[in-house]
């Protein structure tokens, strides 16, 4: 039997692309799996082939090479004009799993990963003034686009799946009934503890468009040594770029990231918008507890007092970070982190998708 997985633009295997790739890899052990996307970078095509997955590149012209901007461009094409779905031609008897918000097609299941308007609403206050100014005038278009995507997707899909209870509640308030919650998978064979002799002398964090940079600055101002990974420098406030207590690493390989997670005292993850959150689960998979907010996706994956610490506001996060930095925590937490993360391993999550197919 052939399974078609429809995916967002595949420029890299981060963000919304990763679930489609990991699930395709696992399903290919039992089915002939094809990944269809508006655009697939040549390096990603080769990677998919090496995993035993057949790529189908629709060759949609995108003007942006940055993955986030390319995704937004593809979303606009579909949300406002339904142009991407017109380019796809799937066999009537093939099973289709749609992991995309940028191509809406008839499917057995549609995996929705968040509302564009809600995400922009949540992150706007941490962005530069010109982003906020542009969004103020574009907001009605994003709301219209979200509604149009939901209307078309719900009409064409038999089962609607999302990746957190928070996301399910958000969609249901927007009028979309969610049939099932299946969490995003991670590869626990790749993300696993790798301790070195010199460790726990820093706190790890992530710099991206969802990061609450004002909170990171408060942690650094409290003399906590921070290492930050991530490639979205355009979003980072200047006052953080040269902070004496922050070492910015930029984009790093997964292998480097595993070492960073494994040897950090803890991972700090303050965010403005995070429907699921890879960082907390990857950190736990490497045996390192997470300090984050007790809401949205991370509030579902991190277990307070066992695999990390959940706080409700900035002040609590700073106080907790200082306490952990100075006093540490029981070594047993690291074992609990790994056990919790294995629940999100791709082999376990793929089993839930197999049940949908069968």
Image (tube, grey):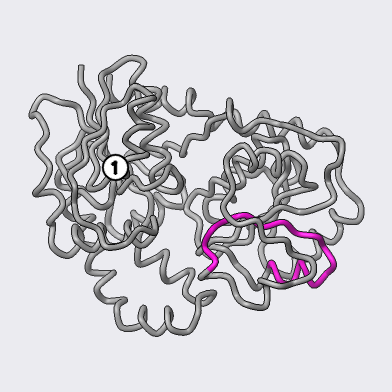
Query: Residue 190 vs residue 170: left or right?
Result: right
Q: Where is residue 42 in the image (x, y as percent from the top left)?
A: 31, 40
Neighbour tally class for label 1: few under 14, some 14-19, many 20 plus, Cα within 10 Å: many
Closest to the observer, 242 or 76: 242
For the point 35% across and 59% down, the residue is 115
Looking at the image, residue 56 sits to the left or right of residue 195; the answer is: left
Q: Give the range drawn in magenta.
A: 216-233
Up-down relation of residue 122 to residue 97 (above or below)? below
Q: Where is residue 189 in the image (x, y as percent from the top left)?
A: 58, 25
> Is residue 347 located in the magenta-colored stretch of the structure?
no
Q: In which quarter of the image is the N terminus?
A: top left
Q: Is residue 6 placed above or below 234 in the rendered structure?
A: above
Residue visible at 57% across and 63% down in the picture? 211
Q: Say left or right for 109 vs 297.
A: left
Q: Quadrant of residue 67?
A: bottom left
Residue occupying image coordinates x 77% and y 35%: 334
Residue 270 spot, x, y in % from top left? 63, 61
- Residue 277 left/right relative to 179: right
Q: Which of these two is toward me, 172 or 235?
A: 235
Q: Which of 201 and 49 is in front in this view?
A: 49
Quadrant housing the C terminus: top left
Q: Residue furthest right?
A: 327
Q: Where is residue 187 in the image (x, y as percent from the top left)?
A: 53, 30
Quadrant of the rendered structure where residue 133 is? bottom left
Residue tagged 1? 7
């Amino acid at each position: 039997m052939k399974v078609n997985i429809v995916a967002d633009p595949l420029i890299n295997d981060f963000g919304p692309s990763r679930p489609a790739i990991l699930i395709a890899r696992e399903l290919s052990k039992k089915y002939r799996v094809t990944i269809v996307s508006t655009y697939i970078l040549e390096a990603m095509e080769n990677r998919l082939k090496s995993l035993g997955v057949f790529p189908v590149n629709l060759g949609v012209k995108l003007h942006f090479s940055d993955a986030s901007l390319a995704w937004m461009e593809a979303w606009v094409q579909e949300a406002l004009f339904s142009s991407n779905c017109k380019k796809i031609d799937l066999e009537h008897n093939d099973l289709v799993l749609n992991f995309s918000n940028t191509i809406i097609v008839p499917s057995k299941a549609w995996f929705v990963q968040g509302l564009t308007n809600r995400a922009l609403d949540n992150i706007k206050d941490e962005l530069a003034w010109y982003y906020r100014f542009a969004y103020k005038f574009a907001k009605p278009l994003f709301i219209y686009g979200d509604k149009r995507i939901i209307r078309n997707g719900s009409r064409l899909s038999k089962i609607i799946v999302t990746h957190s209870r928070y996301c399910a509640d958000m969609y249901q308030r927007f009028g979309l009934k969610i049939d099932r919650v299946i969490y995003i998978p991670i590869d626990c064979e790749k993300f696993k503890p790798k301790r070195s002799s010199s460790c726990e002398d820093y706190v790890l964090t992530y710099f991206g468009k969802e990061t609450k940079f004002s909170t990171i600055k408060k942690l650094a101002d409290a003399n906590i040594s921070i290492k930050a990974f991530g490639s979205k420098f355009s979003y980072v406030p200047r006052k953080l770029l040269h902070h004496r207590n922050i070492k910015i690493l930029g984009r790093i390989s997964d292998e480097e990231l595993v070492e960073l997670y494994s040897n950090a005292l803890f991972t700090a993850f303050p965010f403005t918008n995070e429907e699921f959150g890879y960082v907390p689960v990857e950190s736990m998979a490497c045996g390192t507890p997470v300090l984050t907010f007790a809401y949205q996706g991370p509030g579902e994956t991190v277990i307070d007092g066992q695999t990390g610490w959940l706080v409700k506001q900035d002040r609590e996060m700073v106080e907790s970070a200082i306490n952990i930095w100075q006093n540490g925590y029981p070594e047993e937490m690291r074992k609990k982190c790994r056990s919790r993360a294995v629940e999100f391993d791709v082999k376990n999550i793929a089993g839930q998708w197999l049940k949908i197919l069968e």
